[in-house]
Structures are given as structure tokens and as C-alpha cells.
Amino acid sequence: MNNSAPVVTLTPAGAIDATYHVSRLELGGFVRAADYEREVSGKGVNVSAALAHAGRESAAVVVLGDDDVAFARHCAHAALLRIVTVPGATRVNTSIIDAGGATTKVNAPAPPLARDAWERAVSATLDELDRRRAGWLVISGTIPPLEDQSVPADLGELLREVAARGIRIAIDTSGEALARAAANPRAIALLKPNTHELADLAGRELRTIGDVAAASGELVARGVGAVYTSMGADGVLVVAPGVTVHAQARAVRVANTAGAGDASLAGYLVGFGLADTPDRYATAAAAAASWGAHAVAQTSTILPHLDALPLATIVLDPDPSIPLTEPAVTS
């Protein structure tokens, strides 16, 4: 398989990201923003936009409200979008960033999807995969429930269709949708939890690098190709059969943490595509750490460029006793 083949992303719960820059956030007070940005977003959209900076062909299938289609058609990454429309407005996710770089983020809930909208999203995704001869499908963000049920839309049929085409599948979601994917992950090439999501999957606290490696190894033993865990300030840990890699890069500043995980995932896919050897996991981990650290130094949610990427350090088979800066407990 061509590891640098095009990537299609699916974002079933698209969003308009509104980012306010303030000198100081005062709860309960009046705050006037110094700057304000709106972007068509959603995790898969962010991944596709970041991939485009590396020259990697990508398409972002995204569900958006009819009210925001005109805005989406004129956004900076409009050429990447394959829009699936639903009635009304798109949900708005709000980030408030103070002068010290602290990000307060409020995500609107993902509204239920009509069954027809979900089927159109799946059909558009398969069409893009076939048309572009894609090598990866990335399913990102919240998986909303259908209007006639209370649980996230079932990914099973889509995963089977994609796996039958020989296309690698990466999943970056949370909650019940992540738990369902992890329960039977044999069709999944890459699972990307953060440490808190991984702790929930494992059913125990994660306090060291070794704890993260062990919990990831349990998922690999179930059949997932690789587990890439984002660990915040502690970098990333990639576990695959016979491979454990820790990578870390230092951000020049922390301006906005929103979207950093999506940029990091894009970096992983680019790094993974550089070589078809066992070293690809180390290369992928290094790129993920580098792109993630670069993203938090930017003020926008969507990565604006790849200039001056910070270098990442890589450690194979890291010391399992190293404590996490931010231990993860089960929710």
C-alpha cells in the first residue's frame, strides 16, 4: 500500500470555530475582545487543512448546516471540503484565549443527525475514497446520534466497506463511540486517544509512561494496528506490535491549544508515509510531536503553516517508570 496516498477525513459533527483573543478573562464580567476569528472547522477538517500544507492530497467530508454553506464556500480551505448539508445552522465552538496563552474552550453539543444525513455522509465518504484512490480514512470528532436513537451512529457498515477496499482507517473520537470502536478494532489501523480517553478504555488510572504503554498494548493485542496516545506536555506515545516510541517536542510558546491534536494527527500521517519500514512508527511519532508543538504556538485553531517546525526527540522503549506530568484518571 502507498503510505503517502491521499487521505479522506470524515467529520460527522462539523463546526464553526469562533476564537476570541482577550487580555484577561473575567468570569461574570464584561470583556471586550482584541481580536476575533471564525473558521469552518471540526476535527477532520482541521486534519485535512494541515495535510494540505505538506502537499498531501486530502478531502474533508463534513456535515454543516445550510445556513453556513455560503461562508464555508469562501473559507481558506474551501477546496478541501465535501459538504453534506443539514437544515439550519452549524454548531459553534468557542475558544477564548487570554494574553498568557490560556485557552478556555466551550464546544456546543453535536445535534442528532437524521438517518438520511448520516447515509449521505457515508456515501460521500466512500465516493471520495474511491475517486481519489485514498490510502487512509480518518474519522474524527464527535459521532452524533441519529434522531431515532440515543447512541452514536453505528460506524460498523462504513468500517467494513472501507476495510474491504484495503484502505487504512484512523479513528480519533471519544466517549461511547471510542469505546465501541475499541471493543472490536481489527479493521482499525490507528486509534488516537488522549491519556484520559485511554484511561477510560482501560478502566484504570494512568500515572506513568509504562501505564500508557500497557493500556495501549492491550488494544494492540485486540487487533488494532497501532495506538497513538497524545499526552499533552509529555508528548506522544506510539505502540504497535513490537514497537513502543515516545516522542516529544518543545513549543516556542503556548498561544492556543485548540486544534493541536488534529495537527498532530496530520503530522503522524505525513511521517508514517515517508517510509515503508519498521522505522515509520518512529518517524510518525516524531512528526506528530513536532506538528502538535508547532500548533499550540499558533493563535488559530486550524494550522496556518509549517514554518519553523520544532525538532522532536525520540526514545525507543522508554523508561516505563517516568511519571506523567498530568496523570489520567477514569471519568
Image (tube, helix red, strand yellow):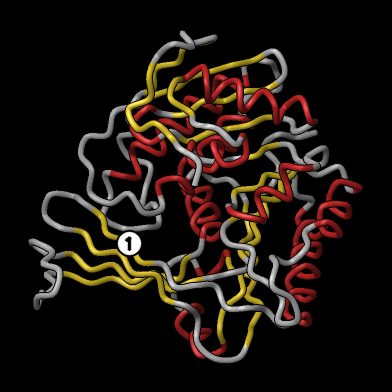
Residue 193 in the image, given as x and y percentages of width and height: 56, 41
Q: On the image, numbered disc 1 is attached to which residue? A: 105
Left or right, 120 with reference to 235: right
Left or right, 61 with reference to 265: right
Q: Picture quarter containing residue 71?
A: bottom left
Q: Residue at x 49, y 31 (%)?
A: 205
Q: Residue at x 51, y 63 (%)?
A: 42
Q: Residues within 10 Å of mark 1 (few under 14, many from 20)?
A: some
User: How many numbered dots are placed on residues in this image?
Assistant: 1
Residue 158 versus residue 12 in the image, above or below: above
Q: Residue at x 59, y 54 (%)?
A: 175
Residue 163 in the image, given as x and y percentages of width and height: 86, 46
Left or right, 249 with reference to 154: left
Residue 57 versus residue 25 in the image, above or below: above
Left or right, 81 with reference to 27: right
Q: Picture quarter containing residue 250?
A: top left
Along the viewing direction, whichever of 216 and 257 lies nearer the viewer: 216
Q: Amino acid at mark 1?
A: Lys
SS for dot 1? strand
Residue 7 versus residue 291 in the image, above or below: below
Along the viewing direction, whichever of 219 and 300 lies nearer the viewer: 219
Residue 118 in the image, given as x and y percentages of width and height: 74, 74
Residue at the outermost right position: 164
Residue 61 versus residue 172 in the image, above or below: below
Residue 21 in the image, given as x and y percentages of width and height: 18, 64
Q: Residue at x 52, y 22 (%)?
A: 211
For the N terminus, the image quarter is: top right
